[in-house]
Image: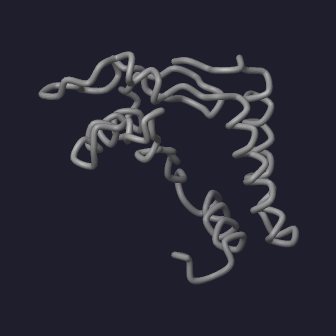
């Protein structure tokens, strides 16, 4: 709803820039809205997003630590600055875990989304999705950081 034209064309446009610029922007995925078993948000709130954004800036500049997950590099608890906030490391571990079955459902949903673009989805996105799927399928039933 927030793109003024076909998303496959939009993605192709951005990927076409790789030959025109020194480097493409890094892409990071966040889930500020993951909920716990009681339906409460696991991330401590909008005002705390700078902790992750600082980690992203550090990663882009080659300074931030990470661990490889089925989805790519993610921060460990120690990689984020928690000054002034009491946020338990076990809650962070639960927030960051990846349930294999849920991840496969998400990848299947993504496949259905990409299918709507009548073959216009960039091959690079399709290849990346397949690489993620392969990593997820090889992962434990529940991946922990």
Classify 61 as above or below 68. below
Q: Determine the image quadrant of residue 119.
A: bottom right
Query: For residue 73, what is the image quadrant?
Result: top right
Q: Position of residue 62 (x, y in %)?
A: 40, 29
Q: Residue at x 33, y 43 (%)?
A: 53
Q: Position of residue 16 (x, y in %)?
A: 67, 65
Is 43 displayed left or right of 111 in the figure?
Answer: left
Q: Quadrant of the N terminus?
A: bottom right
Where in the figure is residue 93, as x and y percent of width and height?
Answer: 44, 20
Residue sitting at 78 percent across and 64 percent down? 121
Q: How far from the left and from the top, in percent, is residue 72?
A: 60, 32
Residue 71, placed above or below residue 106: above
> Quick check: 92 above or below 16?
above
Q: Residue at x 47, y 24 (%)?
A: 94
Position of residue 68 in the picture relative to residue 79 (left or right): right
Picture quadrant where residue 80 is located: top left
Between residue 59 and residue 130, name the one nearer to us.
130
The type of colouring in the image is one colour
The answer to whether 45 appears left or right of 68 in the picture is left
């Amino acid at each position: 709803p927030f793109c003024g034209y076909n998303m496959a064309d939009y993605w192709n446009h951005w990927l076409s820039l790789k030959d025109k610029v020194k480097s493409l922007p890094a892409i990071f995925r966040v889930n500020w809205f993951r909920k716990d078993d009681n339906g409460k948000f696991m991330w401590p709130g909008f005002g705390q997003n700078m902790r992750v954004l600082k980690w992203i800036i550090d990663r882009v500049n080659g300074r931030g630590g990470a661990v490889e997950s089925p989805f790519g590099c993610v921060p460990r608890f120690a990689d984020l600055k928690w000054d002034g906030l009491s946020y338990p490391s076990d809650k962070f571990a639960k927030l960051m875990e990846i349930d294999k079955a849920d991840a496969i459902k998400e990848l299947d949903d993504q496949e259905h989304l990409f299918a709507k673009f009548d073959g216009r989805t960039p091959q690079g996105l399709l290849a990346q999705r397949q690489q993620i799927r392969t990593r997820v399928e090889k992962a434990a039933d529940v991946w922990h950081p």
